[in-house]
Image (spheres, grey):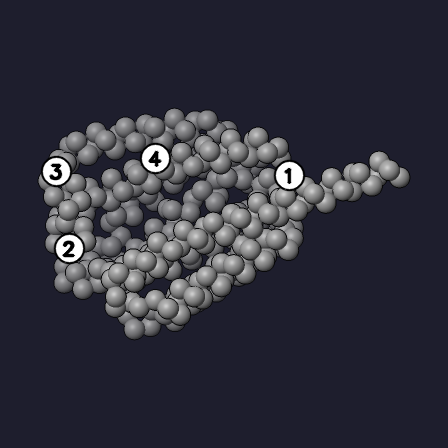
Amino acid sequence: MATYHAQLPVSQTIYMLTLFGVGAFIMRGAGCTINDLWDRRIDKWVERTQNRPIASGVVTPFRALIFLGLQLSAGLTVLTQLNYYSIILGAASLSIVSIYPLMKRVTFWPQLYLGLAFNWGALLGWPAMIGSNEWSVTLPLYFAGVCWTLVYDTIYAHQDKSFDSAIGVKSTALLFGDSTRLWLSFFSGSMVTLLILAGQMNGHNWPFYSISVLGTGTHLAWQLRTVNFDNVADCDRKFRNNKWIGILVLSGILADIAWKTLNSDQSTSISEID
């Protein structure tokens, strides 16, 4: 979206997407390690997680901490490739990442904290490209991501609701119960609304709204209409299907960049002829 706004070079965009992709891979891994360290005693009692390396005893907590140190060092290496503003903003996310695994013990809203942690890149991408933040665009985009996380991770949490209830772990799946479809419809609508707001603030055109917005809304509606919250396999399928929402949002932005570039080139050609 920053590329669209400032018409930045394709080479810079590809470089930054690669950097963010590597950083996301490393830091999501670090988040999983932190989560599995905190949950190693709980995971033993949940059928779906009892074979995880730390919970099963294949990897000791000490070795997991060493591995986590390597992951965080690699993540820091990626972060230091950005400008100072982005380094500070990126480092600020570590506090949320660190406390997220504790939230399922104290609140029925751990999925909200996951959303706050997982979507931090939406705040970071713009300043990494330009050097300053356009909050009117990045904040709606960020909270759209938070709403999206609440949707897919609540579906995910329905896989474990019987185990979670038995061992005292909290989740939005347990909180929403039979009203889950209604709650997730609200968060889905909020996500789409916030995407529209971000697009409006960034001056996007029809490719963004037809692919990123309409495509996402249609996919979310299909998910919520067809998901069986009492079927573990179906919840897993719907959770994994959310990768297509990420692809839709990105595709709409890329298509809009291409559309804007094409129109700009045509205008330049007409001006030269005149």
Which residue does the image show at 63% across and 43% down from the upper left?
Answer: 258
Q: CB under 8 Å between callouts 1 and 2? A: no
For the C terminus, which image quadrant? top right
Does 195 appear above or below 133?
Answer: below
In screen coordinates, is 8 left or right of 69?
right
SS for dot 1 = helix
**In whole angstroms, how far apart are the C-alphas of marks 3 and 2?**
17 Å
In screen coordinates, is 129 left or right of 226?
right
Q: Residue furthest right?
A: 274
Does 138 appear above or below 10?
Answer: below
Q: Which residue is mark 3?
A: 58
Mark drawn on residue 47: 2
Q: CB under 8 Å between callouts 3 and 4? A: no
Q: Who comes first in sequence, dot 1 or dot 2?
A: 1
Mark drawn on residue 6: 1
Q: Which residue is mark 4?
A: 26
Does 251 appear above or below 213?
Answer: above
The location of residue 167, given as percent across then percent down, is: 14, 59
Q: Who comes first in sequence, dot 3 or dot 2?
A: 2
**In whole angstroms, how far apart are the C-alphas of marks 1 and 2?**
50 Å
Counting the numbered discs, the total is 4
Quadrant in which residue 133 is drawn = top right
